[in-house]
Image: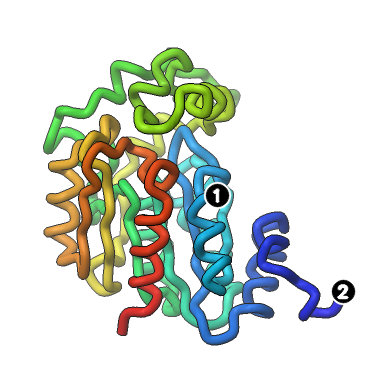
Amino acid sequence: MRPWLFTASLITLLSPFAVALAADLVAGAKPTIVLVHGAFAGSSSWNGVVSDLQRDGYPVVAAANPLRSVKGDAAYVAHLLAKISGPVVLVGHSYGGEVISVAAASQSNVKALVFVAGYAPEVGESAASLSTKYPTGTLTETLAPPVPLADGSKDLYIEQPRYWKQFAADVPQAEAVEMAVTQRPVTEAALAEPVAARSWQKVPSWFVWGALDRNIPAALHAYMAKRAKARESVEIAGASHVVMISHSHEVSAMIERAAEAR
């Protein structure tokens, strides 16, 4: 197939490494936007954002975050970034914020980080340890019993009946029920793993979150944004943890501002 036959919609359907190559072919003057989902979600959680970005001519890659370990997940994303020529705006939701911060530390083509209701830990911090700073989140009490795995690790899920109110309270209930069924588990160890690197100190950052986030309290988001000296930080009134779904236009607009920034 000739390179010019790749379309923007095809980009989201290819394997990660083929995606990166396709992004190179269509990138033009715009940076590639790499989206990294977090725990209890999946790449489809970016669908609304992807539509906006593609409409505006941005090449987009929605990475399938393994959710196994911060180190391993960040290495996976970093390998993807290394296959993309030209500048990249790296976007992470929730636990995906940890992943992008570590991944970007080894990749010089990342021009901006966008934390979408995402963790931005300092070296030595983890999702679990950050949560103790503002212990008003209710995620722990909504988790189902851990699922033991063959390697000794444990997978975590949110209990399906509690998923809507906990994770996605501002999306229609029917949609949240489907999200609960298709949620991607994260390992217990990944949430407790201290990060060994962070890039938000040297790479310009943008933060957006929901005022009614029950997974990561709004006060913690504000703390992390201030610590990172974010170029822009926005709290969206009434929004839940899945602000990229319920307020996709606001999120995609911030991503584009990050892409256009000098």
SS at mark 2? loop
* Residue 1: numbered disc: 2
Q: Amino acid at mark 2?
A: Met
Point out the image quarter for the N terminus.
bottom right
The residue nearer to you, when weighing 154 against 21, is 21
Q: Quadrant of residue 89?
A: bottom left
Q: Amino acid at mark 1?
A: Asn
Question: How far across and down, in percent of the image, does residue 206 sit?
Answer: 27, 63
Mark closer to the chain start, 2 or 1 = 2
Is the residue 146 above or below the residue 194 in the image?
A: above
Q: Is residue 94 left or right of residue 217?
A: right
Give me the residue at 56% from left, 46% from top.
43
Residue that numbered label 1 is attached to? 47
Residue 72 in view (yes/no): no
* Residue 235: numbered disc: none
Q: Is residue 43 left or right of residue 241?
A: right
Residue 234 in view (yes/no): yes
Give me the residue at 34% from left, 17% from top.
142
